[in-house]
Image: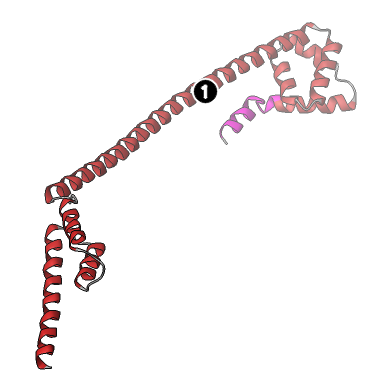
Amino acid sequence: MKLILRVFTAFCIGTVITQMIMLGYFASTGSLSHETGVKVVALMNGIDISGNRLQKILRDAEEREQPDFEEILEARRLEGMNMDLRLRSQKRARDELSEQMAVLVEETQVFDGRIQSINDEIARVKAGIRDQGAIERQQTIQSLEADAAKDQLLRIYDDEKIDEVVGIIKAMPIDKRSEILAEFETEDEKDKLHEIIRRIGDGQPETTAIEQAGR
């Protein structure tokens, strides 16, 4: 009985040692995997794996190409280069976008300056046209008979453009001005004449324009 136990124990120990040797072999060749380990254990435990099949397992494990250390280093180097290229590409894209934004801001400022110049020129032309129109209107009213000229001045006055009436009268020669103002006969006309004369005495409409400009 003891002999049988010794034989059985020796067999188990031999089986375990054999499994460890084979697993160590696969590990040293870099071909150890879950599948290989299962097959080795199955073989050593009498599962349906023949010697030919074991030889095929060993041969497949040896023939299976495993990356060496140099290949791993090269793969990591290439991955690092790809990452560096991506980072450089992103930086270049950001720099190009910043340059385009700077150019856009500069062009916008130039465009705004041109628009302002155009608006200033339009305002100057309009002011010249208004000034010329005021002169022509003053000359037209001055050329009318006194009663007709008074009628036109009252129409402008009633249109709430008193300063324009004052300006027209101030630009007239004294004799023509006297003839027209003498036509203001009714009480309402005399009240309006009083306001016109008051504004002339205050230096309007020039003083009003100066006050508005100083605000």
Magenta-colored stretch includes residue 159: no
Is disc 1 placed on a helix, strand or loop?
helix
Q: Is residue 22 left or right of residue 141?
A: left
Q: Quadrant of the C terminus?
A: top right
- Quarter where residue 8 is shown: bottom left
Between 6 and 134, the one nearer to me in the picture? 6
The number of numbered badges drawn on the structure is 1
Residue located beneath label 1 in the image: 115
Q: Quadrant of the N terminus?
A: bottom left
In this view, the residue farthest toward the bottom is 1
Residue 13: x and y in percent read 12, 80
- Quarter where residue 44 is shown: bottom left
Label 1 Cα crowd, 10 Å radius (few <14 / some 14-19 / many 20+): few
**Residue stretch rendered in magenta on the structure:** 200-214
**155 in relation to 172, above or below:** below
Residue 105: x and y in percent read 42, 31
Magenta-colored stretch includes residue 212: yes
Residue 161: x and y in percent read 75, 25
How was the colour assigned to the protein in this rendering? secondary structure
Between 66 and 126, the one nearer to me in the picture? 66
**98 in relation to 167, above or below:** below
